[in-house]
Amino acid sequence: MAPAPSTLQHDAAHHRSLPNFETPKVKRISNAAVSSPGYVQVRTDAKRKNTLHALCERVPQLPVDFFLGPKGILPPLHPDLDIPTVVAKLKATKDLVINSDGGRWATYARDPSQYDEHEDVVFKYIAEITAAVQNASGIGSSSTLEFKCNPSLSPSSSTRTNDTKPDCYGLLKGARTNVVNGNPYWVDIAVPGEFKKNTANSNWEQTLWSLNYIMQEDAERRFVFAFSIEDTKMRVWFASRSEVLVSFPFDFITDYRRTITFFLRLMYASEVQLGWDSTMKRLSPRHELGNVQYDILCDGVWYRTVRLISDVGAGALRGRGTRVWEVNETTTDDHGDVIVDPTPRVLKDSWVDASREREAVIMQKIREDASKCQDPLVLGLNFDKYFMKIKASWDVTIAGAVDDTHALIRCGRYFEGMAREPLMICSPTKKRRAKYDSNGPLGPTGAIKLPDTYVERVLEYDAKIHHRVVFTEVGVTVTEIGTLSGALRALADATRALFILHRSGWVHRDISTGNILVVNGGGRLSDLEYAKKQGDPGHRGVRTGTPFFMATEVERNTYLHGATPSSRKNRAQVSGGSNAERLQWLAPWDEDPDSDATDGFGQPKGPKPRPRDREEEALEFARITGEAFHHNPLHDFESMFWVGAWILACSDFVREGKAPSAMSDEDWKVCVRRHAAFGQTLFGAENMRYEVFVSARSFLQGAKGLLGPVYGVVYDLDVFRTELLNEYTAASIRHRDSSQEISFSSMVGVDLYISLIALFDGNALDLRKGDNDLTINVSTRDEKRLQMQEASKQESEPAASDDEEDGGPNAKRRKTGGAGSATSGPSRGTRSLASRNRSGGQ
């Protein structure tokens, strides 16, 4: 039973090691970290800040009855419970849990802020109050939860380094503790809680981080409830993949009926009602670290996970929460034994917008449109070679109902007609340092420009549906292939997939390193859930994509490049020749230089690129007033440019092979630092990507001093950047002259696809044949990310000489900006895209 208030003074003696002030506030740092295989410890305060940034530092406040009312979103009260009866029992107890006058909890004769003792002492009686409430419930069955206050203990994690210490939590009854330190496990915490003696909003930050951590740590969690107390003010929190919500405050001491209702509704709820997923079963014991194994249901079939491929999407509270596993299908024999099919599959678990078509449906539509396409070049490419094959697709159902964040999880409650306002977690700022973080194997989270003016209103986000897809093939992301040539070859195949997609009237809208996979050495374009067919009226003007790879126009949701044509005219096109000859350029390049399909240099036979005439004057794009912004094929091309730039700038290259070994250790270190600085330049500032993309030579100049094989590809990629800007200008002119939307299938000529394929495939062949290929250490991606975050703080290395290009568009050679004898240019024979475009190959 909770002791009398005077006991607080006595208990303080046992906490003399604790200072007599509140828990220190979190230091604000602008960087991010999201868990993934091979996770490296990153400071918790930085990850908390990333969580706040994703929520725009605000959470919608709603009436308490939205949570605790008869139709509130908390689990319903147990049918055998009666709140007035519980209150009467608590008043009648010998130790007076509630004061005799019925005005407040007896333990708190004064408000918490009026006590001198440390907050850990003042609030430790929350656990004893909840125990008394449970005893007074009169229910014979055991409760699901018990509440504990252990603010000095950090719960144990199965998958990542953790130093978070929630002040209080509702723990599954009978949950096992860590045998080493005696702490509970995060996966057994149902309801985290935070308390403070004052009203500091750092309490809210910590609450949000606990919500985030649980959703990130436990693949079985669909949603989470939490609570926070600041002095007497208690708030109820809720987080799902659609949104984070919080109640207006109520006095937990004097409004004890609501406090009792809150704890009882949670203590006697089922695990499913508390947010656990009944269609997933954790097989690994709590103490097992690393790869946690699950059985997962999809469309009536159980799959057993083999390894986690990615959980990068689970790092944000609001979003798709995507996790991807390699799995095996399982069946049960007549004796009840599980039989595992060794055939590898891939299972993707995510939360998709309820109003969107599912990925399997979109894939089938694209396939049908591609088969109907009249372009012989599309019909000449194998669709299944460049896209993933889907085996099963299923909207998850819980107890017979679709797992919908609004209709099921939120009990069909909506905001309409309710008093609501945003709870500001911290003061918004107009300018903020961009986050630079690779986010593990699937690429960066990036930094999205937030609006300078914050609108003080509450937005209700669309519902999301829990969805699973099983693919028949297993691959790795383009950042995990292990060699630069392998990554470039995969990008070439992804460009071929884009050719099929665009010519069939579709755009992808989410090109990223995570959506380009490598299966049996070939590249595949995946994650088509945001693909859109031209003319589809749904989701117009909605910004879609992955930060860092999102086209600069898409990032700002407006047309930008019509008025920024390039003065350079080294655009290449394939003129003349038959469709069969063009198809040779689109088809994969043969590795054998003596093959009948290639010329003596390993290039496809057929017409060679020649310079294309271009207008030199700048033409301003006249935007149509009020016209909605549309994602088009050029934006997919720009995303491919940024994926290539990310791989070149941010990969962790290893000193293996002939070329790196020719460098001294000091030269290698200099190049590594310059790579880090180059990556920071491209992705480390809010507006830098736009400036680099539209400014002549900025991209190339920033690459001076990189490893030679890398610089050679950067040079060619800069040529393509110019070509792409010219295409933006040409498209804007056509649109201005016709005042009509340009068809996706005709917006981009085949020559632009061929140029990008030649860039990636040609450099990949040159790297392999010239023995200049670079190994990428995929096991230290996160360490590389941290090094890059610190790179901007180090003293800059001396800039490389500002070499000019030799000649104009018809020049046959160029100077290089590579460093060291082994990196002084491609040394590849030497047929980069630029030289092929200017001279037709050498």
Image (cartoon, rainbow, N blue to C red):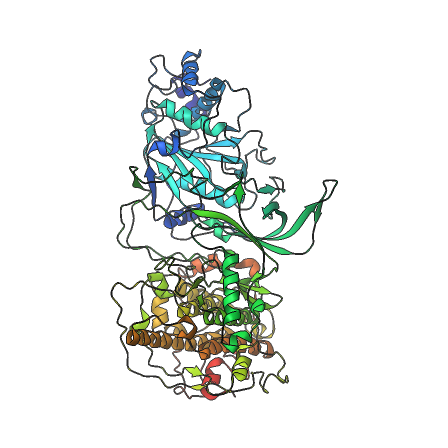
Note whether residue 799 is visible. Answer: no
Which residue sits at x=43%, y=58%? 789
Which residue sits at x=56%, y=61%? 778
Residue 204 in percent (x, y) is at 37, 39
Residue 567 in percent (x, y) is at 33, 81
Number of numbered discs: 0
Question: Seen from this angle, which residue lies furthest left?
Answer: 625
Q: Nearer the viewer, residue 493 or 331?
A: 331
Note whether residue 592 is visible. Answer: yes
Which residue sits at x=63%, y=85%? 596
User: For this view, does 284 lie left or right of residue 363?
Assistant: right
Question: Seen from this angle, which residue lies furthest right?
Answer: 335
Residue 306 in percent (x, y) is at 63, 51
User: For this view, does 620 lie left or right of residue 492?
Assistant: left
Q: Nearer the viewer, residue 365 or 720?
A: 365
Residue 708 in percent (x, y) is at 50, 75
Q: Nearer the viewer, residue 404 or 438?
A: 404
Above-or-below relation of 250 to 9: below
